[in-house]
Each structure stands twice: as C-alpha cells, then as structure tokens.
Image (spheres, rainbow, N blue to C red):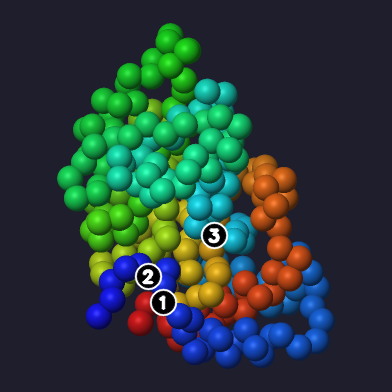
Amino acid sequence: MFFASDNWAGVHPDISANLARHADGVATAYGDGDLDRAVYRRFNEIFEREVQVFFAATGTAANALSMAALNRIGGIALCHSEAHMNVDEFGAMGFYTGGARMAPVPGPLGRINPEALDRTIKRYSQDLAPAGQPMTVTITQATEVGTVYSVDDVQAIAEVSRRHKLPLHMDGARFANAIAATGVSPAEMTWKSGVDLISFGATKNGCWMADAVVILNPDVGNDLRLQRQRAGQTFSKARFISAQFEAYFTDDLWLR
C-alpha cells in the first residue's frame, strides 16, 4: 500500500460520470446556472442554515481567500504551529491579504491548546500597535497529523476567540474525514460550535478539483465576492465544480 498523500488518489467514478454528464451543451456561466444554484441549496441543507458558497481552485486558495475576508490592518491569524496554512502554503495568506501573517500556537497532536491560544492573543495588546492585530483564529479539521477536534474542543477554541472578539475559521480540507470519524453533523461541528467560515475541501476525498469557502456567519466576509474576483478565483465554467459537488453529496457519497 502507498501512503504518500490523498492528493495522489484518483477521482471517484460517480464524480467522473457526473462531470461527463454535464460536459455537453451550454449553461449560464460564473456560478449562476441551475446546477450551481442547486449545489448552493445542498450546502444550505448540509449546514442546516443559509450559507454563502464561493468556489476555489485549491485548498490553499480557499484558505487564503478566507483570511483575506477576515483581514484587518496589521492582521495576524493564529493557527497551530503544524497547520498547513503555516507550513505548506508558501505565504499565500500574506499574498492574498497584502501582508497579514501567521502566529503559531502550540498544542498536542496538531490541535490548538485553548489556554495557549489565550496567552498568545494577549501578547498583541492594542497599546502595542507595531506588533500587529489579531484578525482571526484558524483550526484545521481534521488536523495535519490525522487527529480531529471534538465538538467540545471546537467550542473551547471558539470561546477564547469570542472573548477576544475574533472570528473563527476552519480549514476543512479533510472535513469529511472529521465528520465521518466523530458522527456529528456538519452544523454541530461548525457554526453551532462557533465557527464563522470554513474552507470546505473535497479534492482530497474523491473529487478532481473542488474546494470552496463557505461563509456560515453572515456578519463576516462581506467583500469575499470581490476578493475572489481579484484573486482570479471566479470560474467561468463553474458548473464543472458544481457537477463534482452534486455527485459528492448524492446519497452521502462524501461520508462513505
């Protein structure tokens, strides 16, 4: 058996077939077609509330766009020291945000320790402007080392974030694995536990190329549509991403 990366895996036959099925004919472009709208509604059903969905080419793009949506002057995103965004995305967040940076937070087994998060945030006093301003907390679910945050874990991180008036982002490149492992609903794992937006990944779970930023809290990310356009992440033939998500969600394929 070969365990290099889930990025090496092929595409699930159901997703390939659905891509081929939607390849003929014409459809409204830029994510405004019937198929796109059906997929947006499916996201609403999965998260048990109305959400905003913005497709992205990669998980890195979804993460960087999420950070851009939450950025502020002197922005600092607090993440685990082993987070993909901190270790493997080559400064994409700083590029998309115009200079925001990461502040790593320790914790065992790839998970942020809430007490360490609180201490790290407190280092950036409003009276010490040159140090920068925390703009968000981001957690990875499942983590880079294969562990998952429980609902209680997420709520503990969210409590610290709320105390400091910071939104909470979830890097869900392997979100399906976390949901399958814990058995809780996507809503319980995210907005019901205090998560404001998620980078929702499917590429690592049987899709060809399907990632998205999903805004769960309507009070954040108001400029994301414009930021996505500026970043070159607005797809003209978005139906081919929607076709993947349509098959991905059918009969809960994504959780099998």
Determine the secondary structure under disc 1.
loop
Distance between mark 1 and mark 2 Cα atoms: 5 Å
Is the C terminus in the top left, top right, bottom left or bottom right quadrant? bottom left
- Distance from label 3 to label 2 (Cα)? 14 Å
Residue 157 image offset from top left, x and y in percent:
30, 42
Please tell me which of labels 3 and 2 falls first in the chain: 2
Whether residue 255 appears in this view of the structure is yes
**Type of amino acid at the residue the image marks with label 2:** Asp
Q: Mark 3 points at which residue?
A: 58
- Dots 1 and 2: beta carbons under 8 Å? yes
**Residue wearing tag 2:** 6
In this rendering, which labeled residue sits more in front, label 3 or label 1? 1
Q: Which residue is drawn at 39% across and 15% down?
A: 125
Which amino acid type corresponds to the residue marked 1 in the rendered image?
Answer: Ala
Q: What residue sits 42% from the left and 10% below the top?
A: 128
Residue at label 1?
9
